[in-house]
Amino acid sequence: MTFALSLRLVRNLSSKEGFSTCLPPACRQAGTGRQAGMTTMGTEFIMNTNEMDIEFYTKALESAEKSGDISGILRSCNQIGLVHQKRGDYDRALEYYQKALEIAERTNDVAGTSKSYNQIGLVHQKRGDYDRALEFSHKALSIAEKIDDISEVSKSYNQIGLVHQKRGDYDRALEFSHKALSIAEKIGDISEISKSYHQIGIVHQKRGDYDRALEFSHKALGISEKAGDIAGVSRSYNQIGIVHQNRGDYDWALEFYQKAFDIAERLGDIEGISVGYQNIGIVHQKRGDYDRALELSRKALEIKENTEDFYGILRIYGQIGLLHKLKGDYDMALEFSHKALGISEKIGDIAGVSKSYNQIGIVHQNKGEYNKALECHQKALDIAEKMGDIAEVSKSYHQIGIVHQNKDHYDRALEFYQKALDIAEKIGDIAEVSMSCHQIGIVHQNKGDNEKALECHKKALEIAEKIGDIAGVSKSYHQIGIVHQNKGHYDRALEFYQKALEIAKRVGDIAGVASTMGMIGRVMHMKKNYKDAFIDFLISLDIFEKLGSPNVNIVNELITELTKDMGEEEFKKLLEELKPRS
């Protein structure tokens, strides 16, 4: 049977049943206000500053070479290298940084040699070659310490801290960032103080310590505002937005992303505009509005394709691939994920290759191609282990655990989740600890061990509440509801589903609202409250259809089961009862 009539019913019922209150004003008025202005903004008037910079610095280099201006040659090589680095052309960046290094060494410019080592280290860090990055950054540090260049020492500490943060060694990252901060404060280097605060904030965000992350990000913001550093202000706005996004506070995330976007627009900053589209798109993705997220990701891609920013393009390809996966369009998801992988391999972005393999593996999981998924996740794991990226190793273990769980290999799943949990606890990644507990709880549910499942979900809930992870709290409530439902404690299940639903409505998690309404409908079905069950299913179905979600099929199956249990005559009576009266 089709449910067109049913959907018309729920849309007519929406005011009576309060469906419109499932979505916050920001979602009900999608496409209005400040964000709507973004959709009409064209990219044709944005100047390609990367190309202009290359042209300008190349002319400056030619002029310096003709006049024998060694410092001018050095400066131009570094600037050209920086432009190539920003657009992800790492081989060309290394070529010019290496040229600058050779000149600095030949002319006994010790300070210039130290700076070149740091620049080369930064490129290796961007590529995910963390051992090489540390090698060059430590060379830079050694020279800076030897010549007592305190400012460069501080920069080297920050650079070394950044590498440790990227590979998930958060304690070491904090150690070096605090060393950098201490020196920067001592010499009054405002710019480096702000960067140190920013880096420390990122480490706390990565660990899931969101309050501390916000504390340091706001400190960085305050300094940048005071110093009139517009780029620094924008950077802090984006970072604060990321923290709010990670904890599920989507309205706040959008507010800060929009502030950063406004600055980028005002400055004609192509990179900032593209990043703004991406970040705002991710919030819409988190809320379940996949079409809006895709629209913004394509705008970001349109800008990047005109700039030849390979690294930026691969990030957007990955994001578009993820969105197609969430919409259930797995062929398109694989197409974009493989595009991201291809660019990562081309530019030597080792970390990007590992992440792409994990994403491709997830798509194969969703297609039920578990052996292909395992193959991809194993490749990601091998790369992550080779480059010493502890955080990515943990994520790969997590994904391998999910595949084994989907194959009903529960003991193997628990083995890999435990490995991920051990790493998360070791590096102090609180958010990942919560996520692993959550996943382990689901495995125990699948095994029928409801008590162990409850224990794990309560632990995940406790952590999520402690760190202010609103989205995590909602997920834990949802899972605790499922456990009580499995135990036949239907009223307790409804109590937790209601808590999850309230959070989903409050933060604008549209997909979360649909999922929880579906679960409430299942409980009502079990309680033989068929009318409420049917209405709940229809609300869930309507949202999933609007989102273009593959979960539509699941809800349709639930409605089919309900109609079978009711019987044809009872179901017809219910349809007649719910039919709008003229």
Image (cartoon, helix red, strand yellow):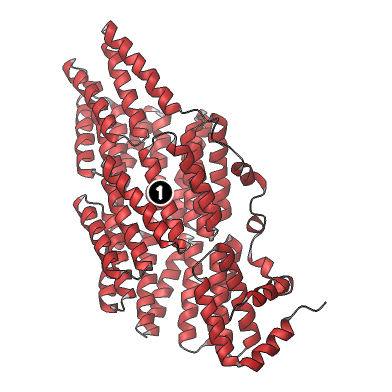
Q: Badge 1 local density, few (<14 within 10 Å), some, or many (20+)?
A: many
Residue 191: name its quadrant. Answer: top left
> Is residue 458 in sight in this rendering?
yes
Quadrant of the snapshot with the N terminus: bottom right
Q: Relative to 374, does residue 490 appear above or below in the rendering?
A: below
Q: Position of residue 470 (x, y in %)?
A: 51, 62
Q: What residue does disc 1 label?
A: 317
Q: Relative to 526, does residue 352 appear above or below in the rendering?
A: above
Tell me the residue at 31%/15% (across/down).
61
Tell me the residue at 22%/29% (across/down).
145
Q: Residue furthest right?
A: 582
Direction from residue 280 to residue 71 in the image, left or right:
left
Q: Residue furthest top?
A: 67
> Is residue 465 in sight in this rendering?
no
Which kind of residue does numbered mark 1 sit on?
A: Tyr
Q: Relative to 535, does residue 140 appear above or below in the rendering?
A: above
Residue 67: name its quadrant. Answer: top left
Tell me the residue at 43%/74% (across/down).
458
Residue 188: name its quadrant. Answer: top left
Q: Position of residue 83 (x, y in %)?
A: 36, 28
Task: Please tell me whether mark 1 sits on a helix, a strand or a loop.
Answer: helix
Direction from residue 422 to residue 328 in the image, left or right:
right
